Amino acid sequence: MSDVMQIPFLDLIAPHRELEEELVKVFRECLRTASFVGGSQVQGFEEEFAQFCETKYCVAVNSGTDALRFALIAAGIGPGAEVITVPNTFIATTEAISQTGASIAFVDIDERTYNMDPNQLEDYLKFRNRQSAIRNGRPRAVLPVHLYGQPADMDSILEIANRYGLMVIEDACQAHGALYYSKIEDKWKKAGSMGLAAGFSFYPGKNLGACGEGGAVTTNDEKIVQKVMMLRDHGQAKKYYHDFEGYNGRLDAIQTGILRVKLKHLSDWNEKRRQKAYRYNEMFAQIDSLILPYEPSRTKGVYHLYIVRVQKREELQKYLSERGVATGLHYPIPLHLQKAYGGLGHIEGSFPVTEKVGKEILSLPMFPQITEDQQDEVVNRIKEFISART
Ligand SMILES: Cc1ncc(COP(=O)(O)O)c(C=O)c1O
């Protein structure tokens, strides 16, 4: 087995080796100034990340989950409200909704982009309008997820939301730097700059990852900023004057310092991910039984994950694992079929596109430093598996 090439799903060591000196400097500076919570590192990062996202403001918080929960609460979401999202996301998206006291509504996804299908959103809202009784609360917001680093169809979602008087909060936790061409504004827009507010995650494996937990809210709305800043700090704007109960949701100075070092490389890393994704696409082009990522001409994704769809997914995953190729499933069980959401009353068949796609997706090794040799190995193993079965 020792001569088998081991290919990680994600290499978190290589980028840190490259940046080690700079990162250690951040830690040393924090030790020497004893500036651990708040201060110039945090503010500096917030300014730089807002600039990167092309938003007026950024508020750094403890995690992507906090970011989404705080953004929703700041937008006025709470008990009596319903927030509409997709069932093929990480549970943090829906935890953030429930933890505000609001209820969750799901709509199905587009089979090609894996993002919220605007037609399903519209159908759901028409259906809700026809209902005389308010079942779980009134629809108040839409929470599209830019899954795998590909922006959702924001023009359509914003237009529908606008017509129905709903707010839009983006889950940009996987989409740092992803671009969407807005026909309404006639320009390319960054993920996290299109809705009323957005949540980002800086979990280590994200395109921009901390050396620990981290997240941020981006927005152009000053009221949202003020509220999120208080929410992350026990409901206070002035020390020991608490206007409401908040959270301990601050991001510390060491993590923001680390993120500032990495942010300088993010565009380059994103471009590398794109190039690797296109290289995979080219190498897989002749294989009919693989469905490759679809990138509409209006989006420029950042390939947080590179997903293929294939029949006999479990068998292929096992085959690859036995040959040193690590893969992932994002996500194997749709949220509406999770035990945690049994109370919502959904069954197998409730969201057929999500369910179908969920059985076929496989996430292949993807990170900026993946080498051509490593990619060749992944592709050859998959080709080998497929040709043995056709
Ligand atoms: C789509 C999505 N939403 C929300 C989150 C939550 O982010 P965090 O893990 O930083 O709380 C994640 C991160 O895993 C995510 O991928």
Image (cartoon, helix red, strand yellow):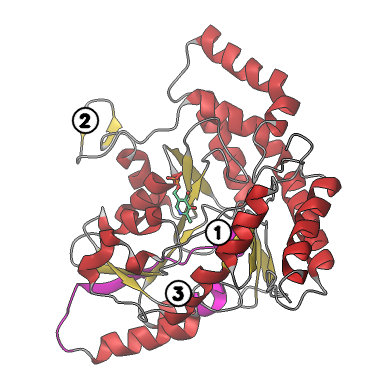
Disc 2 crowd, CA 10 A, few/some/many (<14, 14-19, 20+): few
The x and y percentages for residue 187 are: 69, 69
**124 relative position to 120: left or right:** left
Residue type at the position of mark 1: Ser
Residue 152 belongs to the span the image colors magenta: yes
Foreground mark, 2 or 3, reads 3
Residue at 64 percent of width and 48 percent of height? 326
Pair 3/1: label in front: 3
Report which quarter residue 348 is drawn in.
Answer: bottom left
Q: Position of residue 216 (x, y in %)?
A: 48, 44
Mark 3 secondary-structure assignment: helix
Q: CA distance from mark 1 to mark 2?
A: 32 Å
Q: Residue 364: tell me if it is visible.
A: no
Q: Would you say the residues marked 1 and 2 are in contact, meaning their CB atoms lie under 8 Å apart?
A: no
**Coordinates of residue 221 in the picture (x, y in percent):** 44, 55
Task: Answer above or below: position of 2 versus 289.
Answer: above
SS at circle 2: strand
Q: State the mark number for residue 355.
A: 3
Quarter of the rendering occupied by the N terminus: top right
In the rendered image, residue 174, in percent from the top left (x then y), is placed at 56, 53
> Magenta region: which residues?
132-157
Is 364 situated above or below 117? above
The residue positioned farthest toward the top in the image shown: 32
Q: Earlier in the sequence, mark 3 or mark 1?
A: 1
What SS does tag 1 mark?
loop
- Residue highlighted by disc 2: 241
Q: Nearer the viewer, mark 1 or mark 2?
A: 1
Instruction: Say which residue appears at 26% left-offset and 53% top-offset.
Output: 99
The residues bearing labels 3 and 1 have C-alpha atoms spaced at a distance of 30 Å
Q: Considering depth in this image, is 12 or 236 the residue closer to the camera?
A: 12
Residue position for label 1? 193
